[in-house]
């Protein structure tokens, strides 16, 4: 399949992106709708495809944290603020809400959905244990 894809769409490449996309679209149409597949008893993939019976939401539901937790939104730079500290977590979390549960004086468990990201020491502004995969 990959050799055929390259031969029909990319060697040589089309003159511009629009022409290249048209080649990919033609290949996909032929591959899925016209060409029989031996692995499918010579049926086409399109003839065997069925939409999922499982509903999928268009919107991902944000995390919900207990009422006594501190909630912080992660900045574009991947950081949060807690009191007078700016603490870097991860840019992968930008615009996400994380939960902070105080587990001891000045120690906060940092949680994303139900995953513990680490423990924040308010005195140092550092998070330790980032990356472990415990659930709350």
Image (spheres, grey):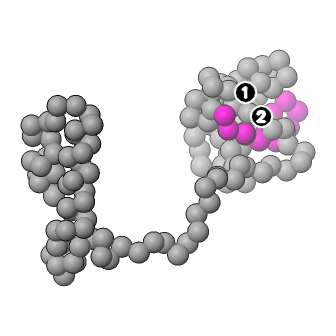
For the C terminus, give its image quadrant: bottom right
Mark 2 crowdedness (10 Å alpha carbons): few <14, some 14-19, many ≥20: some
**CB atoms of marks 2 and 1 within 8 Å:** yes
Residue at x 72%, y 27% (from the top left corner): 80
Residue situated in front as seen by the camera: 8 or 38: 8
On the image, numbered disc 2 is attached to which residue?
72
- Which of the 4 image quarters holds residue 104? top right
On the image, numbered disc 1 is attached to which residue?
80
Instruction: Say what secondary structure mark 2 lies in.
Output: strand
Residue at x 21%, y 78% (from the top left corner): 43
Q: Is residue 72 visible?
A: yes
Residue situated in front as seen by the camera: 14 or 84: 14
Disc nearer the start of the sequence (2/1): 2
Instruction: Say what secondary structure mark 1 lies in.
Output: strand
Residue at x 20%, y 46% (from the top left corner): 23
Which stretch is magenta? 95-107
Mark 1 crowdedness (10 Å alpha carbons): few <14, some 14-19, many ≥20: many
């Amino acid at each position: 399949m990959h050799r055929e894809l390259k031969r029909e769409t990319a060697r040589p490449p089309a003159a511009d992106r629009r022409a290249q996309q048209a080649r990919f679209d033609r290949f996909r149409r032929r591959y899925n709708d016209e060409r029989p597949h031996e692995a499918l008893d010579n049926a086409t993939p399109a003839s065997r495809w069925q939409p999922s019976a499982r509903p999928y939401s268009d919107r991902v539901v944000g995390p919900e944290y207990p009422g006594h937790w501190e909630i912080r939104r992660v900045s574009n730079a991947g950081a949060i603020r807690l009191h007078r500290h700016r603490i870097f977590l991860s840019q992968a979390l930008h615009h996400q809400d994380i939960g902070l549960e105080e587990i001891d004086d000045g120690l906060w468990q940092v949680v994303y959905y139900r995953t513990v990201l680490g423990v924040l020491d308010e005195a140092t502004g550092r998070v330790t244990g980032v990356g472990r995969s415990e659930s709350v």
